Image (cartoon, rainbow, N blue to C red):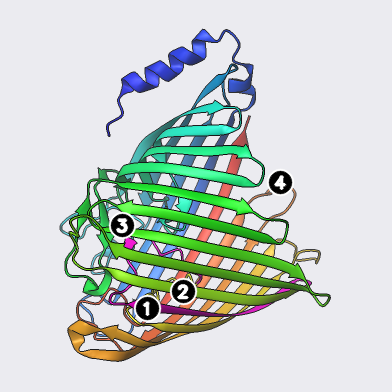
C-alpha cells in the first residue's frame, strides 16, 4: 500500500468543491506539545553497557480538520515531530533507550523530525482514516512510551451507527517505530529468542468490536492476523459496580494466539489469561491481579511495542512461556483536595515458573516494584502542564547474556505542556 501526493490533492479538491467548508474549519483544532523526556535504565547485571540513558526534547504539532458538509464529509489531519538530543556525546558508552534514532556506530542523532498525514472521510457517524494511524487496540497497540508514539501506515474503518457499539476494520502494511523516521515492514517481537526465528510480514489486518452493555460493563472482542506469522484473538470484560463501601472493579483479558499461514517464525501456540479485581473507595483504589501463560510458547507481540496485558511494567513484559504473575497495586488520586491534579501509584509484581528452553530451565523468577507520581496543573495560566516521574526496581535471575530484560533500576521523567490554538 503506497500513498502519494495525488491522494492528498483529491482530498483537497473534494474540500474546495463543496462551496461551504464551515465544518471543515470550525471543527478543526491545532495543538503544539513540548515534551521533555529523561530515561535512565541502570543495569545491575554484567553487561557490555552499564545503562541505557538518554535525555531528549520533543515537539509534537497536530492540525486536525473537521469534515466538509455533504453526504460524505472529507478532512485531513497533519502531524509534525521534531526531537533533539540534550546529552550530546555524553551518551557514548550507554545503550540506546528508544528516545532517539541510533546509527550503526551507536551514535545518537542530534536532531530529527518527520511529517505525517491522515486523510479521512465521514458518512453519518462512521469514519474512514487512510494514512498514518495510531491504533490503540488490544491486538494492535501503538506504543506511546517514548518521546514520540509509534505509528502505522494503513486504513481504518470505524462503524458507529449502533448505540453503544463500535466496529473496527483495519489494515496496515508498515510501521514507524518510536525511534525512527522511516516506515518498515511489521515484525514479530522475538524477545529473548522466544520463537524459532525472527520474522517480518507483508501486512496485518484486524477486526474488532467494543460493546458497552451498560454503565457497569464494557466488553471487547478482537482478531488480528500478522500475515504468515501469527494470528491472535482477544476477549476482554471490564466492570464497575457500587457495592456500598465503594466501587468493585474488575478487568479480565484473554489472548489466544497461534501461528498462521507459512508460519515464518515457527510454531506459535499460546493462551494468556489475566485478571484484576479492585476496590475503589473515595480517592483510593486497592487491587490484586493474576496473569498466566499457557501453551507451547510465550505470548507473541509486535516488535517495538508492549503487550496490552493487564500489567504494564516498564522493565519487562511478564509474558514468558508458562509464567505465572501475582501483583498488588495501590492508587491514590488527590482530586477534591488542595493537591488536585496529583496522582500516585505503587505496585509489586512477582513472576514465577518461567520456562526458557534455551537455558534448560523452567523455574526462573522475576519481580518488579513500581512507583508512579504525576501532577497536571488543573487551572490557571499553566493549565495542562504535566510532570510525571516513574521508578522501577526490577530483578530477575535469568542469564544476562543475550537477554532483553536484565535486572535494573529504571527512572523516567516526563514534562509535557500543550498549547491549544483555534
Query: Which quadrant would the C terminus be assigned to in this image?
Result: top right
Q: Distance between the Cα atoms at labels 1 and 2?
A: 8 Å
* Residue hosting label 4: 381
Q: Distance between the Cα atoms at labels 3 and 2?
A: 43 Å
Mark 4 Cα-neighbour bin, 10 Å: few <14, some 14–19, many ≥20 = few
* Residue hosting label 2: 273
Q: Is residue 252 within the magenta segment?
A: no
Q: Horizontal placement of 275 versus 322: left or right?
A: right
Give whichever of discs 1 and 4 has the lower sequence position: 1
* Residue hosting label 1: 294
Q: Distance between the Cα atoms at labels 4 and 3?
A: 33 Å
Q: Which residue range is magenta in the image?
A: 282-310
Q: Give the answer, above or below, for where 42 lies relative to 83.
A: below
Give whichever of discs 3 and 2 has the lower sequence position: 3
Give whichever of discs 1 and 2 has the lower sequence position: 2
Q: Distance between the Cα atoms at labels 1 and 4?
A: 52 Å
Mark 1 Cα-neighbour bin, 10 Å: few <14, some 14–19, many ≥20 = some
Badges 3 and 2: C-beta atoms under 8 Å apart?
no
Q: Horizontal placement of 205 versus 287: left or right?
A: left
Nearer mark to the viewer, of 4 and 3: 4
* Residue hosting label 3: 88
Mark 2 Cα-neighbour bin, 10 Å: few <14, some 14–19, many ≥20 = many
Place of residue 339 in the rendered image (x, y in percent of width and height, measured from the top left): 75, 66
The disc at residue 165 is: none
Badges 1 and 2: C-beta atoms under 8 Å apart?
yes
Which quadrant of the figure has residue 316? bottom left
Amino acid at each position: 500500500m503506497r500513498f502519494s501526493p495525488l491522494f492528498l490533492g483529491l482530498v483537497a479538491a473534494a474540500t474546495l468543491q463543496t462551496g461551504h467548508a464551515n465544518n471543515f474549519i470550525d471543527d478543526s483544532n491545532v495543538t503544539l506539545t513540548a515534551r521533555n523526556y529523561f530515561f535512565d535504565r541502570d543495569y545491575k547485571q554484567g553487561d557490555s553497557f552499564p545503562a541505557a540513558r538518554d535525555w531528549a526534547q520533543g515537539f509534537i504539532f497536530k492540525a486536525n480538520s473537521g469534515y466538509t458538509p455533504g453526504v460524505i464529509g472529507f478532512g485531513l489531519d497533519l502531524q509534525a515531530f521534531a526531537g533533539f538530543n540534550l546529552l550530546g556525546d555524553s551518551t557514548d558508552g550507554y545503550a540506546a533507550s528508544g528516545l532517539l534514532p541510533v546509527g550503526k556506530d551507536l551514535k545518537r542523532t542530534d536532531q530529527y523530525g518527520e511529517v505525517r498525514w491522515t486523510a479521512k472521510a465521514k458518512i453519518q457517524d462512521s469514519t474512514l482514516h487512510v494514512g498514518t494511524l495510531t491504533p490503540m487496540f488490544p491486538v494492535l497497540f501503538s506504543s506511546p512510551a517514548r518521546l514520540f508514539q509509534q505509528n502505522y501506515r494503513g486504513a481504518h474503518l470505524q462503524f458507529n451507527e449502533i448505540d453503544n457499539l463500535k466496529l473496527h476494520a483495519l489494515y496496515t502494511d508498515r510501521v514507524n517505530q518510536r525511534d525512527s523516521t522511516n516506515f518498515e515492514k511489521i515484525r514479530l517481537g522475538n524477545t529473548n529468542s522466544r520463537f524459532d526465528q525472527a520474522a517480518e510480514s507483508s501486512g496485518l489486518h484486524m477486526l474488532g468490536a467494543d460493546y458497552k452493555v451498560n454503565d457497569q460493563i464494557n466488553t471487547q472482542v478482537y482478531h488480528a492476523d500478522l500475515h504468515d506469522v501469527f494470528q491472535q484473538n482477544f476477549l476482554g470484560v471490564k466492570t464497575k459496580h457500587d457495592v456500598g463501601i465503594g466501587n468493585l472493579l474488575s478487568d479480565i483479558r484473554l489472548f489466544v494466539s497461534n501461528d498462521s499461514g507459512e508460519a515464518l517464525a515457527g510454531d506459535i501456540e499460546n493462551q494468556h489469561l489475566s485478571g484484576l479485581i479492585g476496590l475503589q473507595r473515595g480517592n483510593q483504589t486497592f487491587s490484586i491481579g493474576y496473569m498466566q501463560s499457557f501453551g507451547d510458547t510465550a505470548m507473541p507481540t509486535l516488535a517495538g511495542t508492549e503487550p496490552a496485558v493487564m500489567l504494564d511494567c516498564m522493565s519487562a513484559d511478564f509474558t514468558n512461556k508458562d509464567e505465572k504473575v501475582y501483583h498488588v497495586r495501590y492508587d491514590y488520586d488527590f482530586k477534591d483536595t488542595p493537591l488536585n491534579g496529583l496522582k500516585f501509584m505503587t505496585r509489586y509484581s512477582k513472576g514465577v515458573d518461567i520456562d526458557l528452553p534455551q537455558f534448560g530451565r523452567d523455574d526462573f523468577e522475576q519481580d518488579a516494584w513500581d512507583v508512579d507520581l504525576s501532577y497536571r496543573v488543573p487551572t490557571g495560566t499553566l493549565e495542562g502542564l504535566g510532570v510525571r516521574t516513574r521508578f522501577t526496581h526490577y530483578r530477575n535471575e535469568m542469564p544476562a547474556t543475550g537477554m532483553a530484560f536484565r535486572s535494573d533500576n529504571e527512572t523516567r521523567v516526563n514534562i509535557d505542556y500543550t498549547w491549544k490554538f483555534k
